Amino acid sequence: MDFNEFCQLALKLKNLPLPGEESHYKMSPQLRIEWMKRNKVRDANPKRAGVMALFFPDQKLQTKLLLILRKTYEGVHSNQIGFPGGKEEKMDRDLLETALRETQEEVGVPPSGVEVIKTLSEVYIPPSNFLVQPFMGIYPSPQPFVLQESEVEQLVEVFLSDFMDDSNHIEENLTTSYAKNIDVPAYRLNGYTVWGATAMMLSEIKELLRQVL
């Protein structure tokens, strides 16, 4: 889709209600759904994080969504696909500032270049005890991305048409930090399996976009 057309349509998202947990559950393993029903997130005193779902035009003005492949490291999110973003710091005024600061650090996008169009539903990640606040933004005049080498292995630039294509909604048998060999709903994007919290956030974005595109 032409990026200028996408921007005009995406602005309509501002007044739409969030699908919330219902959309998250579509991309959640049954084990996680059961855990969430049994436990109260606030009782876990979770750490907070902010991430940015960023849409931008390529050189042909076609709309793309920016994801990143994280580095391999000792941690539950090692070598996974996610959004730019990270942990809240004391200096951050709010989680939006967290998301914008981390996006600049990880991929070189200046906060002034991002127009935030929607605050999305929070997603809790039990293995790392993070409560993540996602935001959806547009980056109309992108400069070359600059990767933070210590955090980001590579960029994953997904065409909007591929993201919205239901044939890229799959189920894969995975071993996760909390279970072995379980069937997990996921997206297959640019050859990568995108699952977990990122897939849940993508599910909400996709449901919102379906209402305006």
Image (cartoon, rainbow, N blue to C red):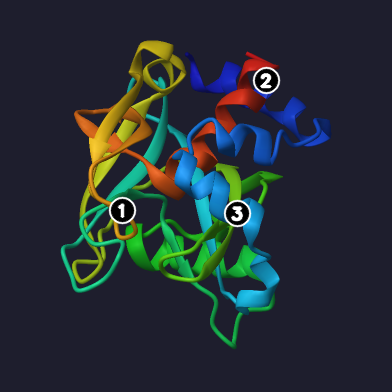
Give the labeled residue for mark 2.
9
Q: Residues within 10 Å of mark 2 (few under 14, many from 20)?
A: some
Residue 206, given in percent of the width and then of the height, sits at 56, 26
**For residue 212, what is the image quadrant?**
top right
Single out the mark in the foreground, 2 or 3: 3
Residue toward you, 57 or 32 = 32
Name the amino acid, label 3: Met
Residues at marks 2 and 3 touching, judged by CB atoms closer than 8 Å: no
For residue 103, side relative to residue 183 (left or right): right
Name the amino acid, label 2: Leu
Above or below: residue 33 compared with residue 122: above
Q: Between disc 2 and disc 3, whose residue precedes? A: 2
Q: Residue at x 48, y 34 (%)?
A: 27
Q: Between disc 1 and disc 2, whose residue precedes? A: 2
Give the labeled residue for mark 3.
36
Single out the mark in the foreground, 1 or 2: 1
Q: Between disc 3 and disc 1, whose residue precedes? A: 3
Q: Residue furthest bottom?
A: 90
